Image (cartoon, rainbow, N blue to C red):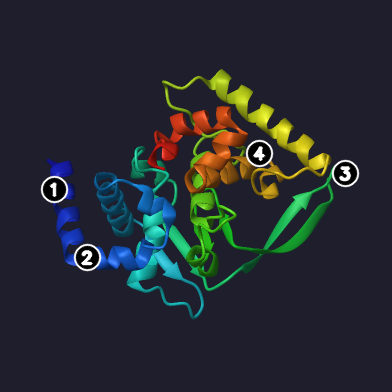
Amino acid sequence: MLRDLKEWRDARRIEALGVTAADWQSALGDWAVYLRYPAAERERLQQLALHLLLHKRLQGVGELQLTDSMRLRIAGMAAVPVLNLGLEWYDRWKTVLVYDGPFVAEHEWHDEFGIVHAERRALSGETMQSGPVVLSWQDVEHAGGVDAANVVLHELAHTLDMRWDGANGAPPLHADMDAVQWKTEFPAAWDYLQDLHERGAPLPLDEYALEDPAEFFAVLSETFFEQPQRLYDALPGVYRQLQAFYRQSPLERG
């Protein structure tokens, strides 16, 4: 009864938003990942994105005022990883903060002697375990280029990774997945790419993937959706593991 009431209220609120086909085209019409979805899946993606807008807070930082089109773009991209998983996979965070461009974040880290160091870095995105998700609008706006970079997919992949025991490149797997296979394919792919990098050979994906296992999973997830053929050609075993995890087959969409 309560669930039915919630669904009814959500439907009314989504209807009140008055989002049109032209609005979706304006927000996502330049994004190849969105355009590759068949019409029925694209409609499901739109509905999921609208539900996300109802239950998450998207907020500009500083003088940045988010327009409806900007919100639709962020929500539409954020809905892709959980299209066949459900929004409950995002239940650990509530807020998306959006800067106009790259932002400076300060982090502390301990060296091998236990000494604490402070480091300031310019970032295009950042995610904390319980939120918020932080994005650079400049990077959202230009997502999906030839380098397969997509800050929204990247940061949302981190949130999925963090659902278990922190950002370590090992998200909670589905019951029908083989954990041994996952633990075989990903380290083998890491070693293969590390070897290429050390030899100065071209890498099939962004070298930022080799920063640590968490970034490895996030960059692989970006590439899985943005350039699936590129990932499959380089790391077919990893592609199949991500296919099973996300329950999607982007390569089949062309």
The residue that mark 1 highlights is 5
> Can you give x and y, in whole percent of width and height, for residue 237 in the image?
57, 27
The quarter in which the N terminus is drawn is top left
Which is more foreground, mark 1 or mark 4?
Answer: 4
Sequence-earlier tag: 2 or 1: 1
Nearest to N terminus: mark 1 or mark 4: 1
Residue at the image point whose x is 48% and y is 28% from the top: 173
Q: Does residue 165 show up?
A: no
Q: Is residue 104 left or right of residue 49?
A: right
Cα separation between marks 3 and 4: 23 Å
CA gap between label 2 and label 1 equals 25 Å
Residue, disc 4:
213
4 or 2: tag closer to the N-terminus: 2
Residue type at mark 1 is Leu
Dot 4: within a 10 Å radius of its alpha carbon, few (fewer than 14), some, or many (20 or more) residues? some
Residue 174, compared with residue 147, is above or below; it is above
Which residue is pictured at 49% across the width and 54% down the height?
Answer: 131
Q: Amino acid at mark 3?
A: Phe
Which residue occupies 46% across, 32% down?
Answer: 243
Q: Which mark is residue 20?
A: 2
Sequence-wise, which precedes: disc 1 or disc 3?
A: 1
Q: Does dot 1 land on a helix, a strand or a loop? A: helix
Residue located farthest toward the front when viewing the structure as drawn: 254
The residue labelled by disc 3 is: 113
Residue at the image point whose x is 17% and y is 65% from the top: 16
Q: CA distance from mark 1 to mark 3?
A: 57 Å
Question: Mark 4 against mark 2, which lies toward the viewer?
Answer: 2
User: Would you call the spot at circle 2 few (<14 residues within 10 Å), some (14-19), or many (20 or more)?
Assistant: few
- Which mark is in front, 3 or 4? 4
In the visual, does 85 lie left or right of 109? left
